[in-house]
Image (spheres, rainbow, N blue to C red):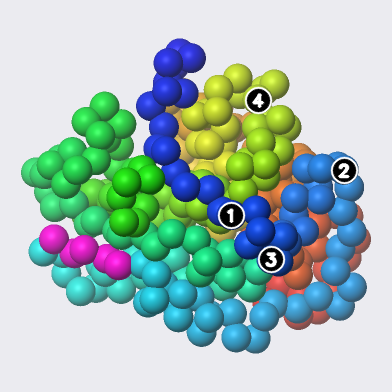
Amino acid sequence: MSDAFDENRPEAVALDAGVAKKLPLHAFALLESGDAFEVVAGAPPTDGRAKAAAYFDAKVKVLAHGAAAELVRAVREECVGQLLGNPQLLARLGAARPIEVDLVPAGKKMSSYGYPKGASARASGLFWDHPSWPAARIAFLQTALASERALVIHEMAHAIQRLAFTEDEQKLIYRLMLPTYRHRSWVDEVFAIYSEREFLPSFTEREGHAPGVYGMARQRWDERHVFTRFVRKLYHPHRPLAGSTAPIPRGLLG
């Protein structure tokens, strides 16, 4: 991957700074100061799943393109499960651009549905956006959804980073991670990969040997990383900090 790889990135519309000020994400305190404190007697939101489902039904449109209803439901459930832990993040997404999801049939290319040819040539999933579009877009190959267990989480993470964070918040992520990963496009992938790991018990050996930054980031992932703590605080602010040695109170994992 070269510096030119950064040029082939979606021109996503970041969250308005005024909206973000009303809906602060405390995870960014980790990137600003490097320190954070656990929520005392934290607990998952009791209505998290219902609110996440309501967001999905209101702001995410799935274009099945012939896919079975079960596959459409599976994508919805994956997204709901990813978003149910943080009401502030959910509220930000509700104020951000809507998303259209294309389930691309076997034998079809993403580019035939309007996605960039170069960006989608080898991808199983893709997030893309442009200010001229009425909605941000995510594509999934129908054939890949059954075999790539974190595909939905990965692409939804891209949507979160580019739509639910302000430009200044995105710069905080790049400031922390660019010294290691060198390109903004690589850092985008690392955020999505760390998001995967927040919802998976581990990475498989095959996932760890994926080409390029995908395998590299999975091999480097560690519970003690500041970035791991940031991602944990983003999706599950009620949980103990990643890497904490304190005993986990009963019921806190939700």
Could you tell me which residue is drawn at 16 percent across and 46 percent down? 113
Q: Could you give the CA–CA distance between mark 1 and mark 3, rounded to whole angstroms? A: 11 Å
Residue 178, disc: 4
Q: Could you give the CA–CA distance between mark 2 and mark 4, rounded to whole angstroms? A: 17 Å
Residue 16, disc: 1
Which region shows up in magenta? 61-65
Identify the secondary structure beneath mark 1: loop
Residue annotated with mark 2 = 33
Q: Quadrant of residue 33?
A: top right
Say whether marks 3 and 2 touch (CB < 8 Å): no
Q: Could you give the CA–CA distance between mark 3 and mark 2, rounded to whole angstroms? A: 19 Å
Q: Is residue 154 visible?
A: no
Please report whichever mark, 3 or 2, sits nearer to the chain's N-terminal start: 3
Could you tell me which residue is drawn at 53 percent across and 37 percent down? 188
Q: Residues within 10 Å of mark 3 (few under 14, many from 20)?
A: some
Task: Name the amino acid type tagged 2.
Answer: Ser
In the depicted view, which residue is nearer to us: 16 or 9? 16
Residue annotated with mark 3 = 23
Task: Name the amino acid type tagged 4.
Answer: Leu
